Image (spheres, grey):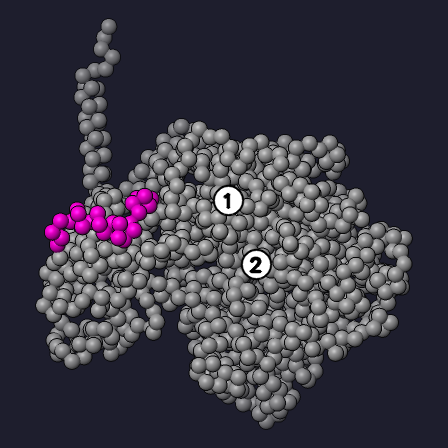
Amino acid sequence: MPSMTPATHAAFEGRVDPAAIRVKLANQRGPRFWRSLEELADSEGFRAWLRSEHPAIAEAASLDRRDFLKLLGASLALAGLAGCSHPPRSQIVPYVHKPVGQVDGLPRYFATTLTRNGYARGVLVRNDMGRPTKVEGNPQHPASLGSTDIFAQAAILQLWDPDRSQSVMRGDSVATWDDFAAALTERVAHFHANRGDGLRVLVGPTTSPTLIAQLAVFEKRFPGARWHVDDPAGIAGRNEFARYRFDRAKVIVSLDADFLSDPAAGVRYSRDFIAARNPEDGGVMSRLYVVEPTPSVTGSMADHRLPLASRDIETFAAQLAARLESGGDATTISGYGRWIEAVARDLDANRGACTVVAGDSQPEPVHAFARSMNQLLGNVGRTVEYAPSLLANPANGDGSLAALTDDMRAGKVDTLLMLGVNPAYDASADMDFVAALRRVPHTFHLGLYFDETGRRAAWHVPQAHELEAWGDALAFDGTASIAQPLIAPLYDGHAAIEVMALLLGDSVDGHAVVRRQWQSQLADHKAWNEALQAGVITNDASKLNPGGASNGSATTSMSSLPRKREPGVFSPTPKSPRSGASRGVRNDGQSKGEGLELLFRPDPTIGHGEWSNNGWLQELPKPLTQLTWDNVVLVSPALAKRKGLRNFDGVELRSGGRALRGPVWIMPGQAERSVTIHFGYGRTQAGRVANGQGFDAYVLRTKDFPWLATDLEIIPTGERYEIAQTQHHFAIEGRDPLRVGTLDEFRTDPGFATAHDRYGEKPPSLYPDYPKADYAWGMSIDLNACIGCKACTIACQAENNIPIVGKEQVRRGREMHWIRVDRYYDGDGANPASYSQPVPCMMCEHAPCEVVCPVDATVHDAEGLNVQVYNRCVGTRFCSNNCPYKVRRFNFMQYADKRTPQYMAMRNPQVTVRRRGVMEKCTYCIQRIETAHIEADKHSRRIRDGEIVTACQAACPTQAIRFGDIADKASGVAKAKASPRNYAMLNELGTRPRTTYLARIRNPNPALEDGES
Amino acid sequence: MAQLFSKRFSFWFQLCLLAVAISFVSWVFLWRWAMANPVGVHDPVEQVVPFSHKHHVGDDGIDCRYCHQSVEQSAFAGIPPLSTCMTCHSQLYTHQEMLAPLLTAFDSGVPLHWQRVYKLPDFVYFNHGIHVAKGIGCASCHGQVDEMPLMARNEHLTMQWCLACHRDPARHLRPRDQEFNLHWHAKDQLALGTVLMRKYHIDTRRLTDCSTCHR
C-alpha cells in the first residue's frame, strides 16, 4: 500500500483555486500553454519547486561543514578499499560449432511475431551473439509498417525479467517438467473414457491458427470437455471486428474510441491517421471529433473534443444517427446540439470519406449506431470494413470466464488447465474465481510468472516467452505470421501450444507443431524459410479482402437499429448472450446519489496486469497524466472542487457493495461525473517490481458490466498518498516551447511559428561557428504528427541501456529517460486542448553545457554532436544546471544493475553502462551513427540518407521524428526543416539547436470555433 | 613575545605532514598497482591449451584470417570455433596430451575458456574492421605474433598510445595486401603513408573526436 505521510512536494498541490485560474486565463499575456493545474494557478509552491534544478536535492542539502568532512574522509577510505583488486581477468569462450551465417560481433535481425490481446504485431528482433537485445518493427507487417508501440519495446525486459517463473512447481515444492507431463497425462487418461466431462482448458484471447486447430481437435476428441477464454480486455466475445482506413478519412468521429492506442492495430492506425493530417501543400488534413468521458491519446489529437459521461454516449450516438438519417436541425438538443449539428454537417459533406468509430468499452448499441452511420454515409468498404472477429471462440457452449467460474462453483469441473492466463488476479470481483478454484480438484497453470493463479494451482509450469517459442498469430487484417524463437528458453519454459500438444498426446515440440499446421500453405523448405524471413505469410488465404468482400452481411438498415427514445430507459438488445454479457453497460436509469459513473480502463502502460512487473513500463510517465509507478482515481476538476479534493488525497470508492481506496488525480478534460480507474495494479504475486504498487481495480469490476458502474459513491478518507509524477519535472519556465496554430492561420501565414522569434534562424553569438565537416547531424520532430504515445521513450531506454530508478527517485525528479514527452494544456481545466512534445537533447551548436564543464567531459565532435564522455565526467552537474532544455540526466546512485546476470545479457553491447556519479543524455544514438560511419568509411563512400535511424525514430508509429545530415539539402531531415512550420525551441538563447520542431496544426471546424474546443 | 608554537609541537606537526605526504604517495602507487591490467606487456599468458602462434603462423604459415574470420567485417576479430581447430586436429597430433582439453571440449560440446590477452575498458569501442579497411596491419598492435609461442600483449593499450596513431596515422599505414604480413616494412614509411592517407580517404578531423571511440 502507498504510504500516507504527506508528500514532500505536495505542498503546492493544495492551492489550486479554480476562480483564480479563470481570472488568470482571462487576463492572459505571455505563453498560454500550461502543464498542470498547479502551474496554471501559478502557486508559490510550484514556483519554488521549479526554481531548483534538481528539486529534491534541496531536501538533502542540510549538511554542515563538519559532517561534510566526515563523509568526505569516509568516502575516500572506502574508495581506496574498493580498489584493492585488479580488474578481473576476462575470458573468451568460442563456439564449438559456429551458427551458420554468424559473424562474430555483428548483430543479426530475425523476424518474429509478438501478440497483444491475441493479435499479431510483426517485429524484427536484434540478436547480439545469441542474445535478443532490441525490438524493431517489421516494415512488411501490416500492423507494424516498421514501427512499434511501448509494449513491443518492453518485451525485451519481460524476456530477461529475473522475476519470471524459473521452475515447475508442484504446490510449494520444485518439480520437473517430466513430473508435470506425467501428472497431466495421467489426468487426461481419465477423460478418454467419459468423453471429457469435467475437463476444461482456459486460454487467453488468441488468433493463433495452430492453437485454434489444437482446440478444435480437443473439442472433437473430448466432446464433453470445453474451453474458455479469459479476456479482461473484453474483446474475445465480439462477433464482429471493424477495420478502419484512417488515411482515407477526412472526417473522423470517435465515440469513446481510443483507436490510436488500439491493442491490435494502434500502431497502424496511428500511421494512417497522421498520413491524412498533412497541412503542407498538397496534403490532406482530416478533422477529428472525439466524444469521450476520460481523456485518451486519441482525445488529445482531437480538433474538437466533447467530454461526455460514458453512459450518455449511447444517447449522443442515437441523436447523431437520427440527425444524419432524417436531416433537420440538431441545434435544439440541449447541451451539445451545436456540436451534433456541426459534426453531422461535416460528415454529410464528406460521404464515403469519413468514418465513425465506436470504442471497445461502449455497449453493443453504440457499435450498431456507428455501423449504421457508416453504412448511411457510404463509408463501408471505403474507410471501414466489417469482418467476423479473428479471435477464437469455442464452438460448443459459452466460452466466457464467467461460465467457467459458474461451472467450477457447481462442481462440474474436475481438471482445469490454465494456459498463459491469470484469472485469480484479473477475473471480475463478483465471479470470485479464487473461491471457485478451490472447488476444482486438479489444476494446472502455465504462466510467465509464478503469479496469483500459479500459486493457487496444484501445478505450475513456466511459460516460454514469445521470444523463446514457436508460434503463429493473425494481424488485425488477417495477415498470418510465424513466431520463431530468438533464444532457447531461459528457464526450460514451454509454450501454450506445447502443453496443448502434451494434452492431446502429440509430440511436445513447438517447431514441429507449427510446421505441421502450415504444411499445406508452406509446403517446402523454401516457402517456410521465406515466411520466417519476411515475418509475414504472403499467400495467406485467411487474409481479409481489402475491398470488403465481407460486407455482404453488413446491411443493417437504419430502421432495424436499436432506438433510444428516452435517455436512461434503453435496454440493450445484444446480438448474442455472450457479446451482450461481456460488453454490456449497466444502464438501469436509477443511479443513486450524485449520478457518478465509474469507468474501468486498462492502464495505458501496464495494460490489464500482464505488464505489471515491467520496470520500463512502470516508470514510463503515463500519457496525459504523467504519473509513474501507481494508478490513481481520475476525477474531473469540478467534482474535485465539489468534494474538496486535492491531488493525491485518498478516497474510498464504493460500488456494488464493494469498496477500494486510492489516491485522487484531478484530470483536466474528464467528464464531470465520470471517475476513471485503471487495471494492472494492486498485484500481490507479480514480482519484485509490481508487488504492492497501487490498488486493484478489478475489486469493483462486475462480469455483466465490465467497463462501467453507475452506483458509484466517492468518499474522501483524509489520507494522503505519495505518488511519483513527472508533470513538473524539467519544466521550461515561462518560455514559449510549443507553437500551435490552426489550419487557417497556417494557410494565411505559413511562417506563424517563427513570426515572433526575436532573431532569425541564426541568432548573433560571440562564439565562432564550428568548422564544417562531412556531415552535420540533426533532427526534426513534427509536433503535428506526435500523438504522445511515448514509444520513443521506451525505445530509447531499450537501445541505450537506460536504467530505471524506482518510485522514490522519480519523486525526487531523477528519472533517467533521455527523451521525455512533455504534455501541455491550452484552455480551461474543464476541457483543455492537449499537446505532446518529445524533448531529446537539442545538440546545440553553441551548447551552454560545454562551456561550464571543468573537465571537458562534454564537448563537440566534428559532425556537430554534443558528446558526453562518461570516463571523463566527474559529476559536478554544472552542465545540467546550464542546460536550458533540461535534457541532462545524472546518475545520483548506481542505477544500472551490474550484478543480475539477466540484465547483463539484456543490454545493448554497443552502449556503455553508466556508473554512479556520471552525467548522461541523448546521444542521437551515436552507436548507430558510428556503425553506419564505419560501414561507409570501409568502402570510402558517403552515408546514405536514411541509413542511420535513431531508436526513437524507428519506433515512432507516425514517423514524427526524422534524423540525418542537415547539410545535405536532399535529405529527409533537411526537407522537413525547410518547412515553414520549422522552429527552434528557445531560439532566443542563441544555442542554435540541431533538434528543431515543426509546429502543430489544428483543424477546427469554424462552426464550433468560438464555442467549446 | 613567546613563540606561538613550541618546538615539540612543530616536530610533531612536521611529522604529521610527512605521514600525510607518504600515505598519499603510497595510495597513489597502491591505486596504480590495483588498477593495472592483470596481463602485463610481453608477459606470456598461460592458456588451457598451450596454443602457439609461433608454430601455426610462423612455421605453418596459416593466414590470420583462417581463424580470426570476422576481422575484416566486425568490431571483434573473432575467436575460432573448435570446429576450426578440428579441421586439422581431427587428424594431426590427436594423441598429444596438450590437445586433450580440445578434444574433450569438442566431444562434450562444452567450449574451451581462453584467457583474454587484449582487453580494452568497457567504454572503449575499438573496431577491427575499419582498421583493416584503412591499412593498419596486425603487427602494428599485436607485434610479431609469429614469434610468440604463447600469446603476449605487445602494447600497453593506453589512450595515449591510441591517440598517437589517430593523430598521425601516416606513420603506420600499409598497402592493403601487406596488412597480414607480419614482417613487412616500408622503405619510406612517411612518403607511403602520405600517399595512402589520400588513397584510403582518411579524414583526421574526426579521428580524435571522443565519439570515434567512446559511446
Examine the structure image and report whether residue B186 is included in the region drawn in magenta.
yes
Chain under disc 1: A
Looking at the image, tell me whether mark 2 or mark 1 is earlier in sequence order.
2
Closer to us: A309 or A100: A100
Q: What amino acid is found at the position of numbered circle 1 in the picture? A: Thr
Left or right? Give the position of A608 relative to A848: right
Q: Which residues are magenta?
A: B185-209
Mark 1 Cα within 10 Å, few/some/many (few <14, many 20+)? many
Closer to us: A201 or A760: A760
The residue that appears at 22% across and 54% down in the rendered structure is B136
Q: Tell me the residue that label 2 is attached to.
A: A957
Residue A424: percent from left, percent from top: 61, 68
Mark 2 Cα within 10 Å, few/some/many (few <14, many 20+)? many
User: Quadrant location of residue A732?
Assistant: top right
The residue that appears at 44% across and 28% down in the rendered structure is A766
Q: Tell me the residue that label 1 is attached to.
A: A995
Residue A825: percent from left, percent from top: 66, 44
Q: What amino acid is found at the position of numbered circle 2 in the picture? A: Pro
Examine the structure image and report whether residue A30 is included in the region drawn in magenta.
no
